Image (cartoon, rainbow, N blue to C red):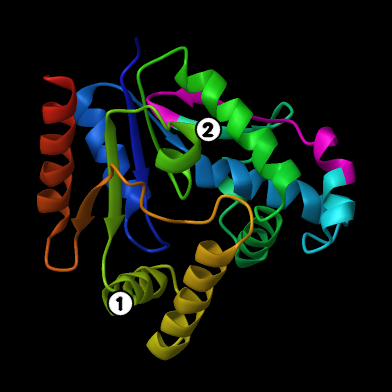
Amino acid sequence: MPINIAIDGPVGAGKSSISDSVAERLGILHLDTGAMYRAVGLALVRMGVDPSDEAAVSSRIGEVNVSVRYEDGKQHTYLGEEDVTGLIRTAEVSAAASSASRWPAVRRAMVAAQQRMAAETDMLIDGRDIGTVVLKDSPAKIYLTASAEERARRRYLQNLEAGDDTPYEKVLEALNARDYQDMHRETDPLRRAEDAVLVDTTELNYEESVEAILRIVEQAYGI
């Protein structure tokens, strides 16, 4: 039976980067589900489909072929045969992904793909519905979070490094809006699974956060 680790949490909690380190330390793959939804967002933008229009999105999702490949130890996200890894981090694509990911047809398609991959190999998956939907039977479930103010501070600093000087107050406002949307969507809302271990990184540095998750996994799997 493959080792399957589920990490959920709100935007800006550091799920992707921390999951990268945990998976590397354990020698397993890390599936970034957010990248898959971003690829859907990119596809919809290219097709001229309004991601907030459920009927339009549902009628076209069958045309969107998202896949993941691991090259040199890193995840590359594909639309068909095109590597779109470097194209899915724009604000436009992010907004489209956030909007489209609310719809049941989109979530069904992505969840099915994620479950197929997890059934075949040792894998850490992070997202917002992993412990509650994708890997419901995993013995290693973590809910990774931090205060909204701390998550906004981290995102603000990341933005500055990337040349984006959006004021902290605007970053916090957008983060709170995203939290509300993720936690109140009708399909698979963000919530902590009943058997998930809470890891609050507000007062933890990066390495401490990684170590906290490794301890949980080691206890769950006896490794």
Q: How far apart are the two marked residues, 2 and 1, measured between alpha carbons?
A: 28 Å
164 vs 80: above or below: below
What amino acid is at disc 2? Answer: His
SS assignment at label 1:
helix
- Vertical position of residue 31 compared to residue 59: above or below: above
The quarter of the image holding the N terminus is top left
- Which sits earlier in the primary sequence, circle 2 or circle 1? 2
Q: Is residue 185 above or below residue 151?
A: above
The answer to whether mark 2 and mark 1 are in CB contact below 8 A is: no
Residue type, label 1: Arg
Q: Quadrant of residue 169?
A: bottom left
Residue 83 seen anywhere in this rendered image of the structure: no
Which residue is tagged 1? Answer: 153
Q: Position of residue 184 (x, y in %)?
A: 56, 66
Q: Position of residue 132 (x, y in %)?
A: 44, 42
Camera-side mark, 2 or 1: 1
The quarter in which the C terminus is drawn is top left
| Residue 68 falls within the magenta-colored stretch | yes
Q: Residue at x 82, y 56 (%)?
A: 54
**Disc on res. 76:** 2
Asked where in the image residue 83 lies, by quadrant, the reply is top right
Secondary structure beneath dot 2 equals strand
Residue 11 relative to residue 187: left or right? left
Q: Residue at x 37, y 55 (%)?
A: 9
Q: Which residues are magenta?
A: 59-74
